[in-house]
Amino acid sequence: MIVITSNQTPQEQVNEIIAVIEKEGLQVHLSRGADHTVIGLVGGVTPKLAEHLRQMKGVENVVKISKSYKLASRDFHPEDTVIDIRGVKIGGENLVIMGGPCAVESPEQIDEIARLVKASGGQVLRGGAFKPRTGPYSFQGVGVEGLTMMAEAGKRHGLLTITEVMTPEYVDICAEHADILQVGTRNMQNFDLLRKLGTCGRPVLLKRGFSATYDELLNAAEYILAGGNRDVMLCERGIRTFETYTRNTLDLSAIPVLQNLSHLPVISDPSHGTGRRELVEPMAKASVAAGANGLIIEMHTDPDNSMTGDGVQSLFPEQFDKLLRDLEKLAPLVGRRFSNSLEAAPAL
């Protein structure tokens, strides 16, 4: 349920409304928009309390939210969420670019890729230290050592870092090294992991499960939000369909749909969404045209010999650079701007 007041309502009256809600043992979440202030209630609201709130001075309306997800709903939070990580803003009109290899392989590899991502105008270095693979004998990542490699490369080249976390036990160590924690498609409904991420103190990129509905994705985000972590991004990374030409089917309609249903930033992953290098560029541009707040793109200096075998969907550095040059021209045409500010990183 939400309580709507005008922004002209005195703060004393808003405080009185909040006091009544908290007295009933409910959580309160405040969202201030351009014209209205929305007071969100989390917990069981009795008809008596709803009527009491409706009659209080300064209250314009009391609206019941019928969706199973509350905190992720745009009804609950009408304004776009903008996540600020050391000057890089994700959400709203900003367009953020996350680039890098599927997996960290060596200090030299990740450092060179970080240099190239920065030179092309990217803001976030991506790379996996722990890799969930379909086959048990496939390369599983270099582990904690890879986190250190990527963190050092990010600091050296002035980039934020994002890495995938697979289990609740590894959340704390990943949070020590990375600026953003990623939940992969296989873990979208790993509820123990989601609960842990609600208290991790780091922004989270939540990838859509390859057979998940929009409602299921938003309910998964709700677990993180309910734990107290409001810095959540949704990621469309392609879904499983009957088509076999592409690795997945990138659902471009998910971008405007999710932005209509939720206030959370929406990131597109054209690399996993297609699984084909030649399709990454057009689908990245299409994602931006559809309104994406950012892109996460695989790029490798030697993709044909990558340790994960995902090189067929990784761009060469020159392709990555050309794509970002094109996006710089495209972004303003669709109401987006690059967010490339980053506070000076400490010297290593």
Image (tube, rainbow, N blue to C red):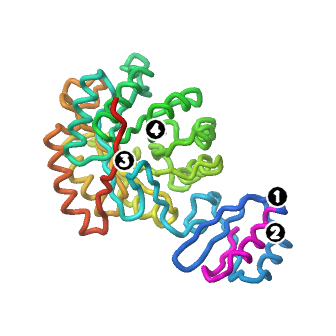
- Residue 50: where, in percent of width, then height? 79, 73
Q: Secondary structure at mark 1?
A: loop
Q: Which mark is residue 272?
A: none
Q: CA distance from mark 2 to mark 3?
A: 41 Å
Hey, what amino acid is under mark 1? Gly
Hey, what amino acid is under mark 3? Glu
Dot in front, 4 or 3: 3
Foreground residue, 121 or 280?
121
Q: Is residue 163 left or right of residue 166?
A: left
Asked if marks 1 and 4 touch (Cβ < 8 Å), the reply is: no
Query: Is residue 181 covered in magenta?
Result: no
Q: With respect to residue 277, does 16 lie above or below?
A: below
Hey, what amino acid is under mark 4? Gly
> Farthest residue in the top direction?
137
Query: Is residue 3 covered in magenta?
Result: yes
Q: CA distance from mark 1 to mark 4?
A: 35 Å
Please give the name of the residue rendered at 86% of the width and 73% of the height, measured from the top-left corner.
Answer: 48
Q: With respect to residue 255, does 231 lie above or below?
A: above
Residue for badge 2: 20
Asked if marks 2 and 4 touch (Cβ < 8 Å), the reply is: no
What span is colored magenta in the figure? 1-22
Q: Secondary structure at mark 4?
A: loop
Please give the name of the residue rendered at 20% of the width and 38% of the height, measured from the top-left corner.
Answer: 116
Residue for badge 1: 25
Q: Which mark is residue 343?
A: 3
Hey, what amino acid is under mark 2? Val
Q: Which mark is residue 184?
A: 4
Asked if marks 4 and 3 touch (Cβ < 8 Å), the reply is: no
Q: Earlier in the sequence, mark 2 or mark 3?
A: 2
